[in-house]
Image: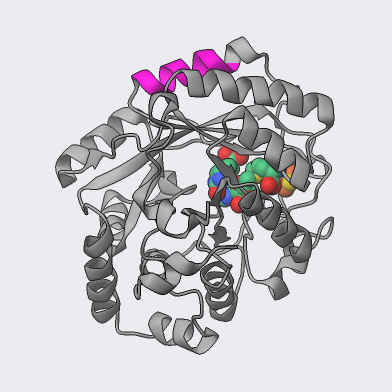
């Protein structure tokens, strides 16, 4: 992994200590936000937010047991399972997302890992979405090194694979795979030259230390993920985590601020859970350095804020959608936040 770019930019560090991360979390709120916002302005236009739209290309009946997820076959959540969608259906949704202003289209599948024939169909989806001029992202579970290279060759820009929480807490949330499995897939994705989208979930009953350790792990990967989704747990009846106490909005903002300081060139996504957040919480999260959202009425299987609501929110805050950084016509124009440390 080429980490020279990190060395040439003193703002980019992959050697954070856990103690440093803890100290950031413990800063007085105003000091933390001031520092996070100053960092944000150094690397990004603070009035631009990157806009992605999700599409569930294969829904439910997942063999994994992730305690937060409505798509696990082990929990009765009343979800209607769906096989892998036809390419035309996916492209129709991608065109609509583009018309509505999304620049990245994220295809999510409820797989432990994709089978070869499924990957062939998904590669065609990637080619089709890219031909529309959108950035492409997929989240399909574990990948081998060869599968990651195949997706890259099909034109995939980003692969989403979340660490979700700390290594220690992970085994209380998921028993069907290990943290090491997750890290291995992240390595395959990075080594294939794909951009990495990797973050976690807060609100699963984790401790402050688990949040510290999650961000520490992300910020000390050989290169920072280009996208860091911070999901707030969407509680779905029937899943083991339904009924937990909700997240303190200020703790969510704090987590975003620390992520911003640790990984200054990454897009930090205010990801799932916005439907349960006030506009004021979201505004504070943008101030703290969040600069990406999922846009569109649905996430994968749960509701996201109505599009009209997000349009109004952006207007009220003077925020514009970030222009696309990469498309088929401009394949060499990589995201500035990525080139410096993608090692590609
Ligand atoms: N099956 C693949 C995997 O797990 O990597 C891809 C799809 S999975 C739904 C992608 C991510 O969505 C998970 O890693 C988790 O971070 C997030 N997620 C799933 N259910 C969620 C929920 N109820 N609330 C918040 N985030 C959730
Ligand atoms: C991510 O970090 N969050 C998204 C995306 N990556 C795939 C998924 C959120 C799912 C929320 C629950 C649902 O709608 O099923
Ligand atoms: Fe399956 Fe992904 Fe849901 Fe886990 S998070 S149950 S792997 S779809």
Q: Is residue 65 left or right of residue 155?
A: right
Query: Which residue sits at x=80%, y=62%?
Result: 178
Image height of 240 relative to 133, above or below: below
Image height of 67 relative to 293, above or below: below
The image position of residue 297, as x and y in percent, is 44, 30
Q: Is residue 93 magenta?
A: yes
The image position of residue 335, as x and y in percent, is 38, 46
Query: Which residue sits at x=22%, y=35%?
Result: 312
Viewer-side residue, 344 vs 132: 344
The answer to whether residue 45 is seen in the rendering is: yes
Q: Main secondary structure of the magenta part?
A: helix
Q: Which residues are magenta?
A: 90-99
Q: Is residue 277 left or right of residue 70?
A: left
The image position of residue 189, as x and y in percent, is 65, 49
Question: Quadrant for ligand 2?
Answer: top right
Query: Which residue sits at x=26%, y=55%?
Result: 44
The answer to whether residue 268 is seen in the rendering is: no
Image height of 132 relative to 176, above or below: above
Quadrant into which the N terminus falls? bottom right
Q: Is residue 36 magenta?
A: no
Viewer-side residue, 277 vs 33: 33
Query: Which residue sits at x=42%, y=23%?
Result: 133
The image position of residue 325, as x and y in percent, is 36, 38
Image height of 51 relative to 28, above or below: above
């Amino acid at each position: 992994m080429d980490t020279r770019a990190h060395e040439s930019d003193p703002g980019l560090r992959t050697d954070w200590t856990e103690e440093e991360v803890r100290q950031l979390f413990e800063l007085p709120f105003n000091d933390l936000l001031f520092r996070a916002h100053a960092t944000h302005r150094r690397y990004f236009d603070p009035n631009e937010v990157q806009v992605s739209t999700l599409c569930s290309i294969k829904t439910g009946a997942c063999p994994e047991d992730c305690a937060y997820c409505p798509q696990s076959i082990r929990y009765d959540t009343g979800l209607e399972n769906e096989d892998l969608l036809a390419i035309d259906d996916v492209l129709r949704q991608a065109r609509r997302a583009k018309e509505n202003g999304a620049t990245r289209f994220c295809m999510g599948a409820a797989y432990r890992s994709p089978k070869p024939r499924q990957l062939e169909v998904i590669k065609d989806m990637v080619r089709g979405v890219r031909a529309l001029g959108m950035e492409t992202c997929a989240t399909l579970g574990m990948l081998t090194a060869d599968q990651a290279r195949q997706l890259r060759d099909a034109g995939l820009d980003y692969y989403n694979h979340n660490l979700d929480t700390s290594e220690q807490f992970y085994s209380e949330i998921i028993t069907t795979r290990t943290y090491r499995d997750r890290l291995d897939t992240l390595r395959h994705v990075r080594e294939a030259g794909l951009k990495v989208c990797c973050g976690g979930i807060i609100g699963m009953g984790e401790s402050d230390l688990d949040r510290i350790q999650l961000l520490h792990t992300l910020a000390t990967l050989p290169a920072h993920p280009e996208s860091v989704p911070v999901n707030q747990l969407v509680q779905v009846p029937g899943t083991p985590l339904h009924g937990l106490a909700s997240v303190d909005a200020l703790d969510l903002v704090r987590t975003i601020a620390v992520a911003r300081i640790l990984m200054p060139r990454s897009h930090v996504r205010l990801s799932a859970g916005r439907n349960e957040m006030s506009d004021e919480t979201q505004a504070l999260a943008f101030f703290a350095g969040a600069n990406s959202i999922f846009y569109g009425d649905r996430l994968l299987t749960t509701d996201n804020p109505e599009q009209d609501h997000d349009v109004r929110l952006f207007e009220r805050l003077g925020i514009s959608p970030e222009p696309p950084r990469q498309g088929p016509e401009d394949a060499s124009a990589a995201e500035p936040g990525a080139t410096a440390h993608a090692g590609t």
